[in-house]
Structure formats: structure tokens, C-alpha cells
Image (spheres, helix red, strand yellow):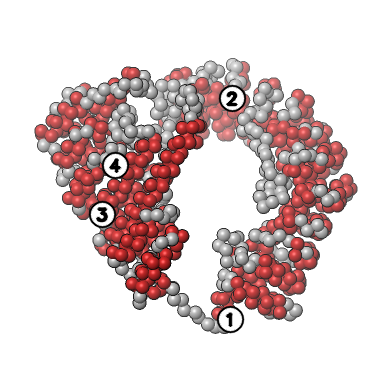
Amino acid sequence: MLSSAWSHSPSEVARLISDAWVADAENDILSLSVLRFAPSWPSDLQATALTIAARSQLEPLRIDFWLDSIAAVDQRFAIDLLLAFLEKARLDASAEATELQAKAALERPQEGDPPVEWYLKNNVGRPIEALLKGEGNWPTANSLAELQPEKFALALATWFAAVCNDLAAVLGDNSPPLGFPLKYQFRLGSSDYERQLSNSESLLDALLTAIRALGQNHPDSLLRFAAEVSSAETAPVQRLVAMALTLIPEAAASTAHQFLLSDPRRFHLGNSADPTSTTQLLVSACAPHWTPEQLEGYIAAVNAYSPTKPSGFIPSGGARSWQRVIRRTRVNLLRALPSHLRLGVTDKDVLAPTNPASTRRDGPTGGFIGSPMSRQQMTRASVSAIVNAFKKVPDTAGWDHPRHHMLGGNVQLSREFASLALKHSERVLEVLAHLEPSFGQRAAGYALAELAKSADPDAVQASLCSLLDRGFCDGEFRGSVASTVNALANREVRVTEHVLEVMRSWVPSQHPAGDSIMEERRAGGDEAESFLLSEDGEHLRIAQGDYLILAAIVDARLASKEPDKAVAVLMDYLSASKDGATWQSMCPQLARLLDGGIEGSVELVQGVLEIEALDGTAAAAALHVQAAQHGAHDAVVANLPRWGQSSKPLTRQGFGEVAALIAIVRPEAAYAAEWFSRIVERDEATTERAGAAASAAHIAWHHREHQTRATDALLRLLQRNEAAVWRRVFRLFAHVESLKGMPEAGRLIEEMAARYEHAPLTNERQFVERLPELISAHSGAVAHIAEALVTRLADKLNDPTSLLASSGDMLVDLSITLHRTVGTQAVGLRIFEHLIEMDATQAREALDELDHRIRRSNWPSAPRLPRRGPVARKRVLRAA
């Protein structure tokens, strides 16, 4: 009502907001929602809005949404309002960061440097950094930056400087040895590297947009902006000034010269890829417009630049690295001069021609940290050069280069070498013949795994045998050998006995499961249910360890038509190791052996199921079902009852899942039918019944040949009116695309209608969606459920956080269909009237449509700024 009154009583609306709402911060959302429709912004209304903004804690998207309408009326005030919102956010973030700082100080170790985990957990600057993040959150701010660049740039840069000061204070980064504080904190898009990583429509993007607009259309204003902001004491703001001056090199030549030489810390303006990149850009742009005296002064200042190392500061590369950094800084700053302006430069390193291949690139190499030798270089290098590269960066180096922190280690080098296998397999094989176990095991393993996919299998196996004979056998190499054997088996290549026997000798190892852990799950019984055989049931894969070796041996034996030898290997391993994680991952291979009817597989499966560490796992549950499917009932009878006696709810639930599924799909298994009957009858078997319902509803019911028995099972389980069972039945409807032609669905819906007063409130929208399909044959049951559902959902259909909030239209359609069906007309009418009383979504619209009435909306439309984009941006600039 107030939003609509702006058109005829604006002063009254403003007075009501000021007198009735502004005093209470609880009304701020309502006030802002009305204020966005204001047709003008007199000073008293501005004061009201600024008061609200100075105390509000709102999300960026919501702030930008309100600014959109306000800026369409008064752009300059919209900037003032944005700044008020941002200043409140800055103060709150600073206070939160201070609290985190105090908490982190209490958790800091008393002695020594804190571990990396401490720094990750106690990132005290995170609340302040979050102010400037958020891609796509500030489209209106970016439009304002183009429309009012001078006001916007100065206002936001001032706020940005305060944010940087706060961040430097909480991080303790107030006096770095070189340059200003926060050297690499924010990406400002001054280079190609940073532009690739920067956000779009963020606050920083808006600030840069305003600065560029000033550079294009208002150079004098940009110089004033630089003068106002250049006193800041943080690197991000100093970089903004340097970037601004770069936009107008001729007009800013003298200003840039004074800017650089008045504070030597400005020699170190850049990004993490190149610490002087911004300074170099400024010099390259402005130096052609300097006078000879200015050029001479710049060269002299750079040559004389030799800051003293702060006392107590120890460079990461040792004491000598300080002078190397200073030296590199001087060289880079002098090289930034155009070549024809280096007449006064005598430094040989500056005057020497640069090698494009060795020139430092703008951004880390190889993506982030790349291989010390690229694939292209390896194709041209000699075999000895490649081998020497691995000697310099051996396996022990891991991810890090022993000497150069911006180059990758042995992992990257080995991956790059392995990538040669596709087109240069002969060269790779030649290099493998010269690698040694002391430095080339990772490279040899990676390369073999790639070669096995496409290269000559005889050559690959010959190289593998040679490596094994030369002592290659560390843990990572063994994993790569397993991958190699798998790849050969997939190509139906017979793997040599020598390789398989060596692999067999590797297991069991001292750490059979590698880095893996047994999976922990939570049993069903509440809304966050987890089941072993259905929905989120999955097998745990082991990244390393004995599983990789065993699985590769089994695959190779099966590919060679030697399944008996595969069973023999597994039986030997079973007698030596009962490691739960390894056997959990081997369960799919055991199922393959059962499917093939291989001699000894039943005894093997029975032995594996006796491992108690597998109780309650998805893999073992599936293996029990597979055993029953293939007639290995003794293995199931001997082991599954142990699950039902477990103290762990998930294991007992798994017992219910497996027992019910076997009883349904194998009706001849009398033991399973007896187990299921006991699950239904025992009062304390609530968890087991949840599992049984999951198997019946989510697995068996969806197979037509098992649907009748699955329905019988669900009807028996529903007798106890337990919420977990009801939820499984409701979820059944979400997994069925259509119920037409399914008589068992009718049996189920009739029983559900008879017991619906005991059902929990469901959030399954698909359940409501399926009800109309059953009206023709079961209208009475559907009507009963629909009426009870609407009665119980009175407070949910208009709750936007409820999953059923979007079900209002379906319930309206259902009520109309029931009203048109013989025998349920009265129920359909009652449901529709109830929906009208609740003002459910689309209920009144449906009534208007039935009455052929068109209701006119009185809600006003708020003005908006044009959006940014290729077309909209031109329109905005024309409007400016």
C-alpha cells in the first residue's frame, strides 16, 4: 500500500516511514522495500535511507537490488547510499576479524612456527577479504561506475583504502621488507594474468571500470583522483594509482615521474607472478613523454636503489638472495624503458638482448607450476639430457623443485615425460632403459601406464621386465605397474608369468590398504537416511595398496582365460590377510567370479564374508545378495545373522536390507523369508524394518517380476506405522516415471489411504505429482489422501523454504479433477475451498480463471538502470 502511495502522497509516505519504522531496526527491510519506489530523493528522505543503511547487515545482491531502483532516480545519492552500506559492512568485518585474531592467538603454539593447518584454520583476514569477493553480485555498482565515474572512483577508492588498512592491521603486514603492505592481496587486472583470474561485476571490477571511464573521458579528473588517493599506505591502492596514470601517459608523465621517485617502495608494485609488473607498465607508458632531465633522474634513482636489509629479516633464499632480488628489481625497472631511451644505461644485463624462451612470463609457468622440461623440449633433447633432468629432480623431490620454487618437481616432470608415450613411444622406451631406481621410479611407472594403452605390448612388457629385474619396486611404481597390467588386460594381451609372479610377491604388504580408510555411514531413521544397497550406497575404492595389485592380477588372469589361477591368488591372499579395506574393494571382482561359476569362488566368497571388518559395508551387503543369487546360500546363512546381532545401527539396517531383498527376489530361500518375518514381528527391529522397506521400495518394486512380492513386503511393513517405512514408500513415487498399468500401485495406495493418519508429513513433491494417475481406479483412496494432505500442509504451502511450496498448483489441479470425478465431487470441492482459505499458490488464480475474471494488479513497478553488456554499456555511456 505504501509503495503504491508514492504517486499521490510522497510526503506522507516519507513521514510514515520516518515516524513509524525508522526507530526500530526490525523494520529496515520493509522501509527499504518501500523506499526503492520513491519518485525523488529530497534531503530528509536521503537522511532516512542513510540512517537505515548505516546499521543494516544485508547481502550484496540485496543491496544491489535496491540500489538499482534508487540509481535510476538519483545516481549520485545511490553512490552515497552504497558507501553507507559498505562502510557498515567494513566495520562489521573488521570487528569479526579482530575477534578471530584474538582467538587465533590463544590457539597459536607456544614454541616454534605454527603448522600450515593452523594458518588455514585461522585465516583472520577472511571476513575482510570477503567484502571484495562475489562474482556477479554488483551489476548496479558497475553501471554507476560508468555513469558517475569521478564520484564513484573517489568514494570507492577511499573505502577500499580503509579496507586495506584494516586487513594489514589484522594480518600484521604493516612493514614488509620491500614495497607496501599487502603486496599480493588483491587481483586488480593490470596484467593479462590477473585479468584471467579476476571476478566480473565485483566491487573491484566496478572501481576499475570507473577509473577506465575517467581515463577515456575525463583525464583531469583522473589526475585529481590520483592526487587524492596516492597517500595510501597499502600496495593495492598504490597499484590503483599507477594503473590510473598508465591510462593517460602523456597527461600524467610528470605526475608519474614524481609518483615513482618520491617513494622507492613504488618500485615494487606488481603481482605474485612479477613483483614489479605494475611499475614496469607505468614506466613503459610514461617514459616516452618524460623530459631528458626526468629520464636521467629516473635512471639515476634506479641505479642508486639499494635498500638496507631490515635487521632480523632472513630472506627465504639466504642472505645472498636479498642482493639478487634488488639486482633483479633494478634490471627489470631499467628494461621497462623503451630501448631508444636507454642511452644513459650502462648495465650490461639491461642492454643485452633478451632470449624470448627465457624471458619471465606474466604468470606462473605450466598452468601454475609446470614441469622443468616441457614435452616439446623432450622431443628435441637427447636421451641423456632427459635422463639428466630426472637426476637433477629425483623421485624424492616430489612436487617441488630442489632449487627453483617457481618450477615443478619430479611429479610434474614425470607426467610430462609420460605424455610423450602417445606419439613418441620409441623415445620413451629408450629413456626407460637408462633410468635407475634411485631417481626414475615414478617416471618409469607413469610412462609404462601410458605406453600400455597403445604401444606395442611386447615392447612394453620387455621394458617392464627389465625394470623389475633392475630393482624398480617402490610403492608408487607398484601402483603404476598395476595400471599397466590393467591396460594390457583391457587390450586382451596375455601378461607374462614373470610380471604376474613378481606382482604376487608384493602382497600382502606392510600397509595393505594404502592411504584408504573404511567408510563410515549413518543408519536410516531420520530425514538424513543412508542405505547400503539403494540410493547413496557405493563401493569404496582404494587409491593405493594391495587392492591395486590384486585387482590387476585378477584382471590379467581372467583376460588370459585362467580364472582358476585368479581364485588361487585370492585364496592365498585371504589366508595371509584379512584387511577389511582391501577386501571391501575386491568385492566387485568376487562377484565377477561368482557370475562366471568359477570353481572355488563360492568357498572364496564365504571366507571373505567371514571377515567381521566388512560387516555393515555396502560392498559386503551387495556380495551377500550376489551369493544368494548364485545359490551360495550357505555363505549367507553362515554370516548375515551376525549383522542382525550387531551393536551398530547401520549394520543391523544392512541386515534388514539384504534379508528383505533376498526374500523378495529368491522366494525359494526359506531362511530369508523367516528372517523377514522376524524383522516384521520384533518390536525392537525398527532399524531393520527401515532397511527392509528401502530394499523393497527402491530396488525390488521397480522390477515387474518382483513387484507383487515387493508390494506384499511393504504392506506388511506399513502395519506398524513407522515413519522410516512411510518415508521409503513416499520416496518410491519419486523414482517412478508413471504408475499407469501398475496394479500393485493401486494396492499400495489403498493401504496408504487406510493408514494415512499415521503417516509423517512428507516433503516428496513427486508423491503429489503421481496421485492424479491413480484417480480413475482408486479415486476414493486418492481423495482421502489429498484431503488429509491439504489439511496437514496448511502452514507449508505458503512457506518458500518448504519443498512443497511449489505443490500448490498440483493440489489445485488434483482438487478440480476430483470434483469432476463421480463419487469424489464433494471431497474435491472441500479441498479447493481449503486451498482458497489458505491462499495457496495459484489457488485464487485458478478460481479467477474458472470464473473468467482478470484481476488487475496495483503493485507499482520500480525503475531500473540499464544492464551492462555490449549494447547496454553504450546506452549507459550515452546517458552519461
* Amino acid type at mark 1: Leu
Q: Residue at x 37, y 39 (%)?
A: 167
* Amino acid type at mark 4: Val
Q: Which numbered marker is on residue 477?
A: 2
The residue beneath circle 4 is 237
Q: Is residue 588 left or right of residue 464?
A: right
Q: Quadrant of the N terminus?
A: bottom left
Structural distance between the alpha carbons of marks 3 and 2: 63 Å
Most foreground residue, 707 or 11 = 11
Query: Is label 2 or label 1 in front?
Result: 1
Query: Is label 4 or label 1 in front?
Result: 4
Q: Which numbered marker is on residue 151?
A: 3
The residue beneath circle 1 is 850
Q: Secondary structure at mark 1?
A: helix
Q: How many marks?
A: 4
Sequence-earlier tag: 3 or 2? 3
* Amino acid type at mark 3: Lys
Q: Residue at x 72, y 72 (%)?
A: 783
- Label pair 2/1, CB-CB below 8 angstroms: no
